[in-house]
Amino acid sequence: MLNTRSEHDRFVDLLRGLGKPVIAGFEATGNYHRPLAFRLLEEGIALRLVSSVAVARTREALHNGWDKNDPRDAQVILHMLQIGATQTYLDPIRAGINDIQELSKTHEFVSKAKTELWHRLLTHYLPLYFPEVGRFAGNSRSDWFLAFLEAFPTPASITAHQKDAFVDAAWDVVGKKVSKARLLGDIYETAQLSIGLPVELDGPAIAMYRMVIAEGRSLIRQRDEIERQAEAVLRDHPDFLRLRQVPGIGPIIAMTILAEAGDLRRFRHHRQFLKFCGLDLATHQSGQFRGQTKLSKFGNARLRRAFWLAAQVAIRQRDNSFRSKFERYIAKDRDNANLRRKALTAVTAKMARTAHAVIKTGTDYRPFIEGPVPSGRTPLRACREGASATL
């Protein structure tokens, strides 16, 4: 069937003509399924989501081959509906998270474009035209450096002025900086000794250079606008406010969690949520062979990355249970990279359990510095019970 209103109407009429309760299972393809899924839900038809990976594995098992076609896939999906190997479909609009999802995904698109452009500057344009200025770059979220490059793209554009004249010309460009005069003086002296290629300021090469810089500044403005809108939408959201209380979880990560997981209360146990994130452990075993136990990663990759980033922030903060857990893991060999990776993975799983707990229980996060646990795991109650004594 085509993805048009007339085809949707025909399909709904067909289902109504059955005269019985209908459960529809589907394998999602991009976002093309969203309008039809919303229409079916509005018509009172229950929906089940079937994993693409599960469909492929089941097709190979049932038909003893990898041959794929639509009639065969329909048979496989029907079989999976019959055995219950499906997931309940969560529609973003009906769940009230569509706006949050769009903010989160657009922020990710803009951030990736900004990172790619920043790397292009650092690996192509600066090495060609002003290699030494890279040490002044600082934070990639700051706009002042790109504004400065847009005004003074090459050493020649700086040394064309006397030092005092350059400082006056660049004073407002760099914005508010500590020891601004010293910074601009250092940049001027660096420009005098630069080995950058001598190109014309009004030539095509510098025009392309400035075009890329302008694009980078535009991406910064877009990202800032998305963050302002996200703050306006979520500032009174109770789940967002509780997530923000957890060490390591900032506004963007909290928004990503809500956008990708929806209402965390729908997961009855934290193990279900860990599996949804792909943070559950899996082991391949056959006969006498037993493989290494590791993360399954069969879950939401954006959620997994969000908790991984939050864990990296938390272990760098002071006096929280996440850093305590990390330190206990690496105590035997602090320089062992493999041990540190496993420790960070354990902290990531703990971060996901904590996020689920504070929302599931509806209680605020309260710092808890727990002692060593024989099993190596942090109790779930640690995220919501206050410590009897503080460090």
Image (cartoon, rainbow, N blue to C red):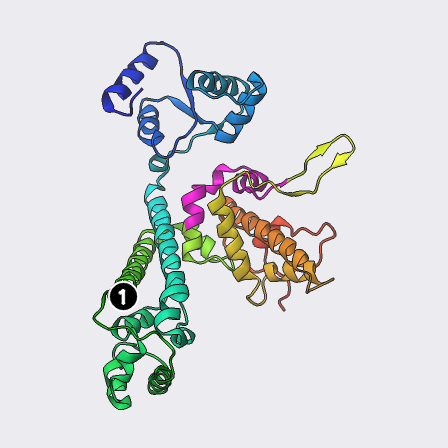
Quarter of the figure with the C terminus: bottom right
Nearest the eye: 33 or 375: 33
Magenta segment includes 369: no
Location of residue 96 by image quarter: top left
Identify the residue shown where x is 44% and y is 19%: 69
Characterize the magenta stretch by its predominant secondary structure.
helix
Above or below: residue 131 compared with residue 245? below
In the drawing, does residue 71 fall left or right of residue 293? Answer: left
Nearest the eye: 261 or 279: 279
Identify the residue shown where x is 64% and y is 50%: 379
| Residue located farthest toward the left when viewing the structure as drawn | 202
Magenta segment includes 271: yes
Q: Which residues are magenta?
A: 256-281
Which residue corresponds to mark 1?
205
Nearest the eye: 167 or 130: 130
Q: Which x, y percent locates residue 42?
A: 31, 26
Quarter of the figure with the N terminus: top left
In the drawing, does residue 154 fall left or right of residue 311? Answer: left
Location of residue 97 by image quarter: top left
Above or below: residue 37 compared with residue 237? above
Asked whether residue 185 is in view, the answer is yes
Q: Which x, y percent locates residue 132?
A: 40, 77
Location of residue 177 by image quarter: bottom left
Identify the residue shown where x is 26% and y is 76%: 173
How would you rate the neighbour count of disc 1 (Cα within 10 Å): few for under 14, some for 14-19, many for 20 or more?
Answer: some
Q: Which x, y percent locates residue 178?
A: 37, 82
Mark 1: secondary structure: helix
Asked whether residue 363 is in view, the answer is no
Above or below: residue 8 compared with residue 312? above
Above or below: residue 119 compared with residue 95? below
Q: Amino acid at mark 1?
A: Ala
In the drawing, does residue 270 fall left or right of residue 193? Answer: right
